[in-house]
Image: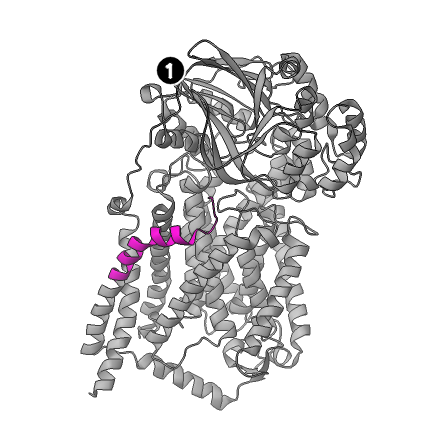
Amino acid sequence: MERFGEGYLEERKLVKRWGGPIPALVCLALTLAVFYLTWWVFQDPRGVMRMYTPYVGYMYCRWWLIMMIWMVYIFNYWPFKRKWLENTHPLIKGTVLTIISAVILVVLIKGFFEGLLGNFGLAYFNPEQLEKLPGVTSFFAIEYASLAILMFAAIASWLSPAWVVAMEEAPWQKLTQPAKGFSILIMTFFLSMVIYFVTMHPHMGILYHPWQYFTSIAPPYWEQFADTVSGNFHISWIMCCTVVVWLVETIWERYPFNLIKNDWARRFTAFFGIIAIALAMHFFLYFAQELTWGEAIRGTRRAFAPDWRWLHVGEMAIFFLVPALFITFYCDNWPRKYSMPVNVLIRTVLAVLGAAVVYIVYYKTSHNFLGTQKGFSHPQQFPMIPMIWLVNIWLVHNWFMDNWPGWKMVPKTAEEIEADHAAHKAAIEDVRWTPKFGAGLTAGAVMGVAFYFVTVWALPGIYAAIDIIPGK
Amino acid sequence: MSDNMNRRDFLKGAATGVGVGLLGAMGLYSYSPLRKSHFEQAERKGTDIGMCRSVKVTNVSETSWFDNGTLMGDIKGAGGLLVNQYLFNWPPFGNGKGLGKGSYEEGIAQIKHLLPGRLDEAWDIIKGNSVNPDNAGGYAALVEVEEMSGNKRKFLLDVGWSYKWCEECFKREGVDKMLENKEIEALFFSHEHFDHFWGLPVALKYDPEITIYIPEGFYPEGLQYIKDCGHKGKLITVKPGLNQVIPGMASYVFSIPIICRVYGEQSLYFNVAEKGLVSVTGCCHQGIIRFAETAYSEIKYENDKCYGIYGGLHISPFEDWDPKYDDLVISLGDYGFEHIGCNHCTGVLCAKKFISAGYPVVKGTARFRSKDTAYLGNGDTITFG
């Protein structure tokens, strides 16, 4: 039977070309250089195309991420054959696959959202339709349409991978491509649309004057709970969902959900567990801002506004993704020598520390080289854009180019694949219920709660001592 | 079971438990009402800035640009709202290279020798080199403070943008003569934006020795421009926080990032006898509610009451909208302002939403190119007290 890219990522062996950390450092330097070059060409407000308006650049950046998820996770590189993936030079493969992702991206945005939905359904997806409204300038027509399209992307970038990571492609996992890919695509797109309508559409409905009472719920139902009418409240938890999906898939190796033996119980627990973890992040990161900057005041602007605080939750969440992906892509998910829970805990600690470092470095320095403005809460300051742009570059590098030139791709033998599966199964079976495990679980839970309250107590002092932006 | 196995199982459980406990606490506690016990009750400093009898504001100009579509077309063409304002090739720093390809150095080199005295000649050169020079207007306000003794003191808040337009406005309101006669004792800049700051030579033409207060955060080009315009007086950079000026008047600097690569905003507080707090702002990028909350925590004012507002409130400066602006419209009523004279970057749509919400908006006359009576327009005045 014709093989496409099913299992390609698991069944490839990436062999280091040099010893020690050199491959990782070389690849980091290379990808950062590509990041900066492409940032200058496409995004930078001082550069060539200046798409960081910000919403235009953000929309393309976000959807490009999803295009790659679709191509690799949902369609398993279809229609490219396995032999082509294994035998083509990474530079050619990277170029071809990147161009294809960009073409699909443009067709989706220009054809589906702006052309189809924007002309025949919801005017706010199409800038030209918006410009027909009195007083709406071309600039804001494009920004509003981009905002709507990227809000859809935020949801899709959570649900598309979640159906693979949590739902394990069920119930279509046994279909061949492209039937499997289209089934998952239609399912996740449908779910994205439902969630879009109950989270983002009410935001768009009050973006215009007068409020669009007959087409959307106005004021939105979350107003009292979130202390704002802005849809940023939803952006926040949805961004956290996106990040948690990838934490589960990469540094957590789907732990602890993989302990559940029953297939459907495991899938649903993982799917809703990701949402539960994301909600925990969503609330905590908002609280963290209250602890460091003071209570939000509804109606004010910038760093004190509830709507911005919710947005910033999503922005903070994305900082966790960068070190987590680096650990998986370039550090071979280090460490691997302990039991799965301990490995997961160590990686999580490293990712949290890494996120804090990237966050501090970003806000201290990014205005010097990205063309953004100094400060946390500039209305056009969206750290999600450069962070996702970097993630996109890493996805191209890891998924399309096999980490070239730091690593060389060698297909695993059948024995090696079998050994991997056995080792993975053993690692899961190694975690089982014993009295000592129960005692550890209880003690750990108490420590986790204690750590939470210590963090809450220490956070204001730590933040004041670091003073990320002097004079803020 | 060996000790080693026991220890390993305990560790596996503990590692899992830490995650469970931590995430559980994060989810259940972080947004619960219990969290509020961690917030410090802000102590009111109650700094006494003194008191004045009244404040009169004359709107010299609130029309920073005349056609919103043209301005937004420039912003779109140059690359958006984060592009450095000195790169747009807007007047007066045109270098003839087109939109988004300007620079301070090349622009000022064309006109420096003509500043501040020969502004007509400078403007002729600027018109030839700049993008959409006729769209430039500016924001400037004359602030007259009546002390408790009855003595009146005058200050200028910002100087606008277009040399041509600003000179016309200064003459219309007699500001040129006041400057020449040294009646205006200081010029406060709210921030470095083009429409508030770039008209500086017009003020210096009539009084090059005027004392200037700028908020901390001006970029090197802005600081150089003050020199290149021929300023000979004192330049005071105001640090973030409260800065007392005269009895009953203080400025407050907020360290905030602003579009078009600008940083820092300075706004004015007045404590008007028997009335309360009056806020006079250029653009109020910090937000009027933040400004009112800061006053509440920082200074003492009559009757503990927010009384009046004048100026740009920076809500929908480009007649754009966002649901977060509705948060402001919904919340402003809680602060009890009795006179709201808004214009400039407030957004006409926002002013109309204020009126619809029943707020005491002081209407204007829509003269001298101001577009709507919902705004306190060019040439209009408002007196507090």
Mark 1 belongs to which subunit?
B
* A313 displayed left or right of A342: right
Residue A267 image point, x, y percent? 36, 67
Amino acid type at mark 1: Lys
Locate residue B97 relative to residue B380 in the image: left or right.
right
Residue plotted at (27% across, 63% down): A448
Residue at the spot x=64%, y=33% of the render?
Answer: B194
Residue sitting at the far top: B150
For residue A406, say whether it is visible: yes
| Residue labelled with disc 1 | B275
In the picture, the quarter occupied by the N terminus of chain B is bottom left
Magenta residues, dominant SS class: helix
Count of numbered tags: 1
Q: With B104 as the anchor, is A196 left or right in this view? A: left
Q: Is residue A68 above or below residue B37?
A: below
Give the magenta part as a residue range.
Answer: A449-472
Q: Residues within 10 Å of mark 1 (few under 14, many from 20)?
A: many
Note whether A325 is above or below B123 in the view shown.
Answer: below
**Picture coordinates of residue A406, whole percent (x, y):** 59, 78
Asked whether residue A456 is drawn in magenta, I would say yes
Q: Nearer the viewer, residue A226 or A334?
A: A334
Which element is circle 1 on? loop
Task: Tell me which corner region of the image, top left, top right, bottom left or bottom right, holds residue A345.
Answer: bottom left
Q: Position of residue B110 (x, y in %)?
A: 79, 35
